[in-house]
Image: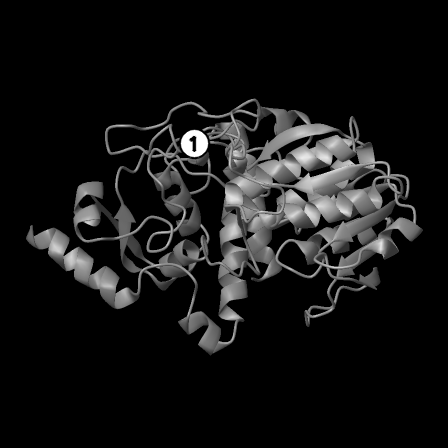
Amino acid sequence: MPASRREFLQTAAALGAGLGIRPGAASAAAPAPVAAPLAARPSLPASKTLLILGGTGFIGPNMVRYAVERGHNVTILTRGRSATKVEGAEHLIADREGDLSVLGQRKWDAVLDNNARDYRWVARSTRALKDSTGHYLLVSSISAYKTDTMGYGTAGRVLTKPAIDEDGERFSPPATWKDGDESPYGLSKAIAENLTHAAFPGRTTVVRPGLIVGPTDPTDRFTYWPVRIDEGGEVLAPGNSNHSTQVIDQRDLTEWIVRLAETGTMGDFNATGPASRMSMAEMLHGCRAATAAPVDFTWVSEDFLAAQKVSMWSDLPAWAPGDPLMYVSISRALAAGLTFRPFAVTAMDTIQWDKARPAAERAKRGAGLPRAREKELLALWKQR
């Protein structure tokens, strides 16, 4: 995107904050403050030695770049299989399913564990690092919360206040569970949190992101919307336009995590966004603000979509009506310095990144309705 357009979007968002509006929405709460560009910040923090576990995946490279830019000595631990090159950091090669003794031979001020998909990886790394680091920051997930008994919403249930905060019930192992067993994603994250707190009592930070989005997202769980809206025309919009949704730009997330390491901030934090409640309509219109394409939204009922076997998340990403995980409290993270760039900038940058992807990759995006299927559904909706 030309710098002038990005600056325009940022300026528009700043002006909108004063007027109490968000770009692309007729009326909404003011967006959260936007973090100042690095050069505009008055001073950089004291340099720290940071170990990042997993620095070449989706959220790793920006975390590494940001930490290096802020003057920290950064080491990353990877298996060495990724083609992604991260400049300015020392690389250690090791497999978290194997020997991690190399980690006990060094000292770090803080460890940023952003690749903790399996609790057994966290068990190994916390054992290896408990005597060689002062602060362990674990990237967990809001999926650690036990929501299976809370139910999913319908057109009649719209969340208007956060359904979960950091004290919400998390998954716990069943009575038959044994250490080393395979575990579902949410349970695995909850166990990983417990292991980290046990290994680093009073020295742990747990960050529970929601849906992480933005450029380089390999899942396409948000990418569908800005890309589809940028194509223009009639866009199928799902269900009740007032249902809540939450996402966080991976750059806002990773930069905040580095700042938590800088300040030695401990505790458990939900991390998603924006700062105030966002409806599906506001999200789609926020994407609309990032493109000049003519767009018309046609809102299609949830009952109709269910009858047509249209799936949440896979067919229509970032849409889970009434799901408690689509509106969690982030007040604790905001108090700890989490900030957000304008939503339209996230959407525009995602569009530009997607356009630069190989054609074969774009043809097989990981989520979203095929255009022919969307057209078919719209026709059936109008014929009902």
Judge by depth and name the residue closer to the eye, 155 or 281.
155
On the image, the x and y values in percent for residue 42 come to 83, 37
Q: Specify whether 280 is left or right of 90.
A: left
Residue 42 visible to an observer of this rendering:
yes
Q: Where is residue 38 drawn, in percent x and y?
A: 76, 46
Report whether 354 appears left or right of 43.
left
- Position of the N terminus by quadrant: bottom right
Report which quarter residue 60 is drawn in: bottom right
Residue annotated with mark 1: 147
Q: Position of residue 381 (x, y in %)?
A: 13, 52
Amino acid identity at mark 1: Thr
Find residue 280 and report its image quarter: top left
For disc 1, the neighbor class at 10 Å (few under 14, some 14 to 19, many from 20) is: some
How many marks do you count on the picture?
1
**Residue 260's x, y, as percent?**
75, 36
Secondary structure, mark 1, is loop
Residue 251 vertical position relative to residue 98 in the rendered view, above or below? above
Which residue appears at 85% of the width and 52% of the height? 103
**Direction from residue 370 to residue 62 in the image, left or right:** right
Residue at image location 46% in from the left, 36% down from the top: 22
Residue lying at 34% horizontally and 40% vertically, measured from the top left: 281
Query: Quick check: can you spot residue 339?
Result: no
